Image (cartoon, rainbow, N blue to C red):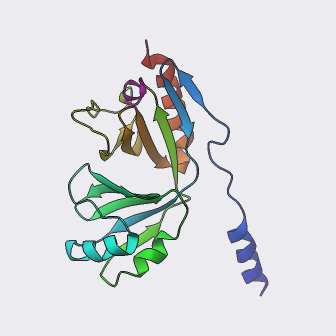
């Protein structure tokens, strides 16, 4: 009984946001943490995609570097059978996936990841300071996403708008990624 009570108290504890109260600015760019969101790492074969799309309420993209969004949900293509699904409203993604009776693996990674917004006319220059990909608008348009690196950290990059990126990284790398982007923001307009 005591063990179950300890587990319940730990589960109910609020996790302090990794980048609480941090912002960085440069000429034409702002770097700021995004609010907590629910996230799953989703793996599924091709024959499960339709069922999972219905269960999640968003069509899982099937082309490289693409995404799909509906309501508060975003599905980012990471590989032929892999997606990062984000729900900014905090609904139960794993529970929704359970409604799909097709083969899949849905792992809740909500507390593993942190999201950082890079916004403004110099956002592309800021992210490009540490990302080897061509992030120009014709090559990496609005809605494009990719698993890539920023400096020495693995990230998932999503272009939310012509002048806005969402940078997803592991919580343990969030200070490094934020600091890197903050320094790049100061240099972006130079």
| Quadrant of the image occupied by residue 59 | bottom left
Image position, residue 119 (x, y; %): 47, 32
Which image quarter is the C terminus in? top left
In the image, residue 139 above or below residue 3: above
Q: Is residue 52 left or right of residue 17?
A: left
Q: Is residue 1 left or right of residue 172?
A: right
Residue found at x 43% / y 19%: 188
Q: Is residue 149 above or below residue 134?
A: below
Count the numbered circles shown.
0
Hey, which quadrant is residue 33 in on the image? top right
Closer-to-camera residue (69/168): 69
For residue 189, side relative to residue 90 (left or right): left
Q: Main secondary structure of the magenta part?
A: helix
* Magenta segment boundaries in residue numbering: 121-127
The residue at 33%/74% (across/down) is 54
Q: Quadrant of the N terminus?
A: bottom right
Residue 38: image location, x then y, percent: 52, 61
Residue at coordinates 41% horizontally, 38% vertically from top-left? 165
Q: Residue at x 42, y 35 (%)?
A: 164
Q: Position of residue 113 (x, y in %)?
A: 51, 53
Q: Residue furthest bottom?
A: 1
Looking at the image, is 100 positioned above or below residue 85?
below
21 sits left or right of 85 in the view = right
In the orientation shown, which residue stands out farthest toward the right?
2
Query: Where does residue 87 sit, x and y in percent of width and height?
Result: 48, 60
Question: Viewer-proximal residue, 186 or 27?
Answer: 27
Magenta stretch: residue 150 in it? no
């Amino acid at each position: 009984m005591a063990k179950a009570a300890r587990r319940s108290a730990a589960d109910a504890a609020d996790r302090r946001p990794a980048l609480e109260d941090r912002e960085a600015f440069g000429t034409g760019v702002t770097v700021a943490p995004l609010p907590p969101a629910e996230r799953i790492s989703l793996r599924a074969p091709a024959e499960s995609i339709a069922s999972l799309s219905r269960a999640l309420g968003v069509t899982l993209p099937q082309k490289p570097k693409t995404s799909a969004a509906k309501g508060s949900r975003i599905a980012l293509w990471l590989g032929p059978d892999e997606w990062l699904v984000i729900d900014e409203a905090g609904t139960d993604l794993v529970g929704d996936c359970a409604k799909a009776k097709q083969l899949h693996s849905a792992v809740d990674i909500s507390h593993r990841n942190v999201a950082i917004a890079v916004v403004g006319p110099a956002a592309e220059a800021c992210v490009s300071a540490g990302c080897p990909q061509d992030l120009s608008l014709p090559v990496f348009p609005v809605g494009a996403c990719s698993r890539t690196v920023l400096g020495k950290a693995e990230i998932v990059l999503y272009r939310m708008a012509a002048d806005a990126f969402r940078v997803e990284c592991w919580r343990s790398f969030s200070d490094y990624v934020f600091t890197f982007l903050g320094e790049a923001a100061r240099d972006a307009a130079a």
